[in-house]
Amino acid sequence: MDLKSHVQSPCIRHCCLDENDVCLGCQRTYKEILDWHSMTIAQQLALKAELKNRQCAAQAKRSFSDK
């Protein structure tokens, strides 16, 4: 990936904010969604790494609540 161009948005077009203003599709907060285009590439990459952790935690929470 050419880091000088851009980082693809983590949006997966399943937008729905929960009671904490976190998107159920991409796990970004409302503020992170709004700030995405003003973030540096390093900030975007760091957020995408954090989103993987959030997605794993959300999946684990859903799996636990299904039992």
Image (tube, helix red, strand yellow):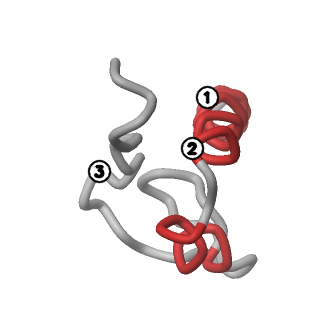
Residue 66 in view (yes/no): no
* Spatial separation of the CA atoms under disc 2 and disc 3: 19 Å
Q: Which mark is residue 12?
A: 3
Q: Nearer the viewer, mark 2 or mark 3?
A: 2
Residue on which disc 1 sits: 52
Category of crowding for the residue at label 1, using alpha-carbon neighbours closer than 10 angstroms: few (below 14), some (14–19), many (at least 20): few
Vertical side of 14 occupied by 9: above or below: above
Tell me which amino acid carries mark 2: Ile
The percent position of residue 43, horizontal first and vertical second, equals 69, 46
Q: Amino acid at mark 3?
A: Ile
Q: Residue at x 65, y 28 (%)?
A: 49
| Image quarter of residue 34 | bottom right
Q: CA distance from mark 2 to mark 1?
A: 17 Å
Q: 64 or 26, which is in the foreground?
A: 26
Q: Secondary structure at mark 2?
A: helix
Is residue 12 shown above or below 37?
A: above
Q: Is residue 16 above or below residue 24?
A: below
- Quadrant assignment for the C terminus: top right
Residue identifier under label 2: 41
Q: Nearer the viewer, residue 54 or 47?
A: 47
Is residue 25 positioned above or below 64 on the image? below
Badge 1 amino acid? Lys
Closer to the camera in the image, 45 or 52: 45
Q: Residues within 10 Å of mark 3 (few under 14, many from 20)?
A: few
Look at the numbered disc 1 and give the secondary structure of its residue: helix
The part of the image, by quadrant, that contains residue 60 is top right
Looking at the rendered structure, which numbered label has been put on residue 67? none
Image quadrant occupied by the N terminus: top left
